[in-house]
Image (spheres, rainbow, N blue to C red):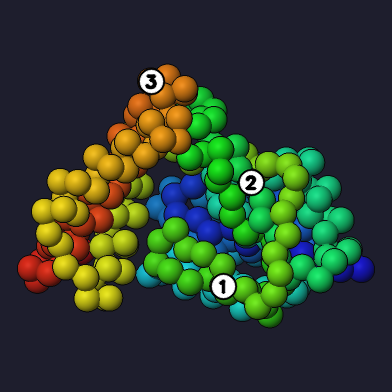
Amino acid sequence: MTKITAIIPTLNEEIHIADAIKSVSFADEIIVIDSYSKDKTLKIAEKLQVKIIKRRFDDFSSQKNFAIDLATHNWIYILDADERVTPEVKQEILEAVKNPKDFVGFYVRRSFYFCGKKINYGGCQRDKVVRLFLKEHCRYAGLVHETIATKGKLGFFKNKIEHYSYKNYDHYISKMNHYGALRGKEYFAKGKKVNLFHILVKPPARFIIHYFIRLGFLDGFPGYIFAKTQAYGVYTRYIKLWLLNKGINEN
């Protein structure tokens, strides 16, 4: 019988971790790889009797790849703590590992929730990620918004998982700052420079893309806030890059 290891990266996810673990309770092994949380994340995870690994965070890809190497089983399901596997996707996962049809991994689409409201537009309607895959064929690459590098074909699940990414506005901004800092470091490592185009044009352009072109206005005021914060994320990454180019590291 084919077995699955579910991996959940965490950092201060006490409000999410129990539900995240329960949503992948079908897995034969569950690994929580934690970046030294300071809240009750680990206490909650320990009560649910999962395997816990502590590793200091450097970037998202390295964190996930480290856990993948320690997984007992060949099929891996990666679950961010703010995601939930629905019963429909669970069934698709179990069927896929029994009969993968030459696929080495599978995309799953996500229903995105922002401050308690489901966001249907603004680009979220196209949101998809690789979550189930064979570990010998797939590895993560990239410091932030990491992607799967695969050796083989990828399939698609029909149903969606739920993505409760930001519990409130402050949480969203803190994540945008974190992602922006990581992306700035990534650009810096590639030798990129900043000019006024990056600061004055690219953030407003990102807002226009999410709010108008990708129909974010159809989500009302939450769609407007979502588009504004996406623009802010672009602004943050280039400010961080500018600081690094000036020899200023805020960490």
Identify which residue is drawn at 15% across, 62% down.
194
Q: How many marks?
A: 3
Secondary element under disc 2, as helix, strand or loop, is: strand
Identify which residue is drawn at 21% across, 70% down.
192
Secondary element under disc 1, as helix, strand or loop, is: strand
Marks 1/2: CA distance? 18 Å
In x, y percent, where is residue 133? Answer: 70, 67
Marks 3/1: CA distance? 36 Å
Residue 149: which numbered mark, if any? 1
In x, y percent, where is residue 161? Answer: 66, 43
Marks 2/3: CA distance? 24 Å
Tag 3: amino acid: Phe
In x, y percent, where is residue 45? Answer: 60, 52
Tag 1: amino acid: Ala
Displayed quadrant of residue 97: bottom right
Mark 3 vs 1: CB contact within 8 A: no
Identify which residue is drawn at 72% across, 54% down.
156
In x, y percent, where is residue 163? Answer: 56, 41
Residue matched to label 2: 109
Decide if residue 224 is on the left or right side of residue 185. right
Displayed quadrant of residue 153: bottom right
Query: Crowdedness of circle 1 by 10 Å Cα count: few (<14), some, many (20+)?
Result: few
Decide if residue 80 is on the left or right side of residue 91. left
Residue matched to label 3: 221
**Do we see residue 48 in this rendering?**
no
Decide if residue 161 is on the left or right side of residue 226. right
Secondary element under disc 3, as helix, strand or loop, is: helix
Query: Crowdedness of circle 3 by 10 Å Cα count: few (<14), some, many (20+)?
Result: few
Q: Quadrant of the C terminus?
A: bottom left
Q: Nearer the viewer, residue 215 or 172?
A: 215
